[in-house]
Amino acid sequence: MRSIAVANQKGGVGKTTTSVNLAIGLARAGRRVCLIDLDPQAHATLHVGVQPGAHAVSSFDLLAGGASLADATVAAADRLWLIPSHIDLSATEVALAGQPGRESILRRRIEADPACQPGGAGYDYLIIDCPPSLGLLSLNAMAAVDRVLLPLQPHFLALHGLSKLLETVELVSERVNPRLRVLGVVLCMFESATRLAGGVGRDVEAFFSSEARHAAWSDARLFRTRIRRNIRLAEAPSFGQSIFDYAPDSHGAEDYRALAEEVDQAAAGAVVRDRWAA
Ligand code: ADP
Ligand code: MG
């Protein structure tokens, strides 16, 4: 099973849109995918057409209530299973204050789940939609996965945010989860007509090939696929549909189909150095 946390401490950069449409893109390509909504805002839950609270067990119960992954799982689409979020998740930091090992609760739940065993017959992908902060929830996500995918909105401060994010990944990989690596950066809400968009892409590539590389991101790539700004992507969540159901012929559907393929290839092409390719 390949596990990916979609993270960025900034809000509104495309984390949820990417988590959901990548998850469903992979599911439509035949992969079995589990999507974990780890944002109290529950946007990913709503985006796949599940009402927060409709299922009695949520990602909060997983972290703070002793529930198992299987208890919290809802079948959301063909080959897509969801661990829904709930607003209670916003109280996780308080609920777990002082609890030893609280940053690796999610990892323990995943490790205990029969569908998440490496090389097993369960999920092919586990994708986690992180909240817009680097607090305990994102920490639990990064402690639990093998790869982090970073959506970036071309913006003149984007690179500043990226280095902060990479610092966090370095820390988590050194102290909590030695398997953790950055899978890559995907540019979202891309507007090819702007000079800034091209510039940020080049800056990210230069950054990734710089001398100061850390082991946790030495294999990171800038995905070739750019997610163009597309109004259909902004409309789809309010219908509880992925872009593939809402507007299958849109640029949004085309881009997320391409990204799912590129992510799948990145995984298949990975030399079997670690469990990622298993
Ligand atoms: P985050 O999860 O990082 O906060 P979202 O994925 O929720 O970001 O995206 C923020 C807003 O931008 C949402 O309203 C979403 O529908 C919209 N959006 C995301 N990607 C695109 C895109 N490529 N084109 C147009 N709107 C987008
Ligand atoms: Mg979000």
Image: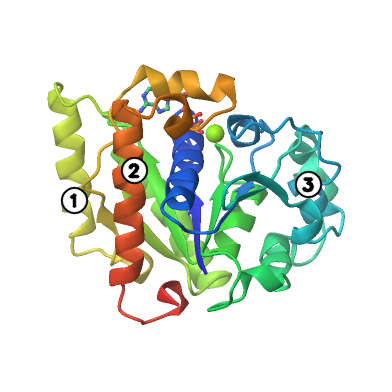
Q: Is residue 170 above or below residue 247?
A: below
Q: Amino acid at mark 2?
A: Arg
SS at mark 1 in the image? helix
Residue 161 located left or right of residue 51? left
How crowded pointer 3 is (Cα within 10 Å; few <14, some 14-19, many 20+) is rated as many
Q: Is residue 175 above or below residue 9?
A: below
Residue 121 makes an appearance in the image: yes
Q: Residue beneath label 1, please?
A: 205
Q: CA distance from mark 2 to mark 1?
A: 23 Å
Q: Which mark is residue 257?
A: 2
Q: Which residue is farthest bottom?
A: 273
Q: Amino acid at mark 1?
A: Glu
Between discs 2 and 3, the one toward the N terminus: 3
Residue 44: x %, y % from top left = 59, 36
Check the image and tell me how it is coloured.
rainbow
Q: Amino acid at mark 3?
A: Phe
Residue 186 located left or right of residue 102? left
Residue 184 makes an appearance in the image: no
Foreground pick, 105 / 228: 228
How crowded pointer 1 is (Cα within 10 Å; few <14, some 14-19, many 20+) is rated as some
